[in-house]
Amino acid sequence: MSDGDHVTRAAARRRMSVGELAIWRSLVDTTAELRRILGAQLLRDSGLSPADYAVLLALSEARGRRLRSSELAAAVDWERSRLSHHLGRMEKRGLIRRDDCPTDSRGAEVSLTEDGARMFRGATAPHALAIKKNFADALTPEEFEALAGILRTLQNHLHPEQTSTSREDLHV
Amino acid sequence: MSDGDHVTRAAARRRMSVGELAIWRSLVDTTAELRRILGAQLLRDSGLSPADYAVLLALSEARGRRLRSSELAAAVDWERSRLSHHLGRMEKRGLIRRDDCPTDSRGAEVSLTEDGARMFRGATAPHALAIKKNFADALTPEEFEALAGILRTLQNHLHPEQTSTSREDLHV
DNA sequence: AGCATATGATTGACGCGTCAATCAAATTTG
DNA sequence: CAAATTTGATTGACGCGTCAATCATATGCT
């Protein structure tokens, strides 16, 4: 049951069918559309981009509501350069702050400002509602089960070593 | 069987569960990772971005290998502004050409250059192989069936009126 | 100690995507 | 027909994301 790649080997020689390709395209198109809709909605409702939201979420969940830059990058699974750029923009808007790290003079500690925390709180409920309306309400419990399984399969395929479940579980 | 929204109404009052939210996040994360991997691979293999590829694909499939700007925008499902910007960059690289439209002096006709056609041909096989390796090889036929059904469900939810299947079918 | 290398983080350049504004040609309408 | 509106398409500004380069501090090695 946990033998992750016998499928890979079994299919290794076959060519991809046009049906499989169509499903791939449909997956890309549909998720892109959902992200577009939900991202635009989030921005209208709260003035936050999805990226802003991800950063504020990670900081909100962090002990002491503060993280080292590198921890934050790991939490949101971004390249550090991307994070630096984005933190610069968020700092300019007053959503977060960067202070020198006491234990490592190279490091930065990122924390929520009062404004950032407030905006995040205000964004949460409408955003969850939008996800529910546009995504969750469409699927039956069986479909959720099936989708969760497929995503686990895909993750196992992309990261064969780790024992699956969510990325958060192994945020070393 | 084709009653598209009884699910919507049935679930309308419930709150979204944390499990459903986790599946949504997993969907976003996993598809983002796949796009990132395949996009980077495509670029390395062929010098084309996914956006370039989409444009060249649409033009390759078009009658006479040329399309009006607006038709092209519809074919790739982009905003016209995005297309304009992207065509500008592609034109500068010599991948496509824009000529005045004979029947409507406002319009532009976009066509493949020889270079563009050649690069597209060279990109096709490795790109399909990468999709196969990273995505298609992971899933069983049953999982493909299930995923296709879920995507149909989601599309029906987003566009209730149309009779589903793929977007291409009704590219009026 | 002194030098090499690792690491934490930022920067600049550049392609990308969205929004609002613009422009010109076509169509509608009084 | 002339003014108003609609349509096809482009532009500019700005935020975003990636890559390669950079910088400063910390760590490892001899």
Image (spheres, coloured by chain):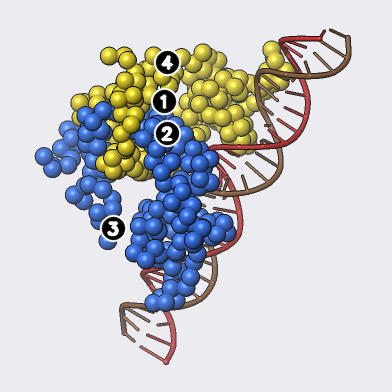
Chain colours: A blue, B yellow, C red, D brown
Residue picked out by circle 2: A34
Query: Mark 4 — residue?
Result: B162
Q: Which residue is mark 1?
A: B158
- Work out whether residue B27 or residue B8 is closer to the camera in this orientation and state it: B8
**Mark in the foreground, 3 or 1:** 1
Examine the rendering and report whether any part of residue A132 can be seen: yes
Q: Are marks 4 and 1 on the same chain?
A: yes
Residue B122 is tagged as: none
- The kind of secondary structure element at disc 1 is helix
The percent coordinates of residue B46 (x first, y second) are: 45, 38
Residue at 51% across / 13% down in the picture?
B172
Give the quadrant of residue B140: top left
SS type, badge 3: loop
- Labels 2 and 1 within one chain: no
Residue A33 picture quarter: top left
The residues bearing labels 3 and 1 have C-alpha atoms spaced at a distance of 34 Å
Q: Residue at x 24, y 26 (%)?
A: B146
What residue sits 42% from the left and 33% below the top?
A34
Residues flagged by tags 3 and 1 on a common chain: no
Between the residue at mark 4 and the residue at mark 1, the CA separation in whole angstroms equals: 10 Å
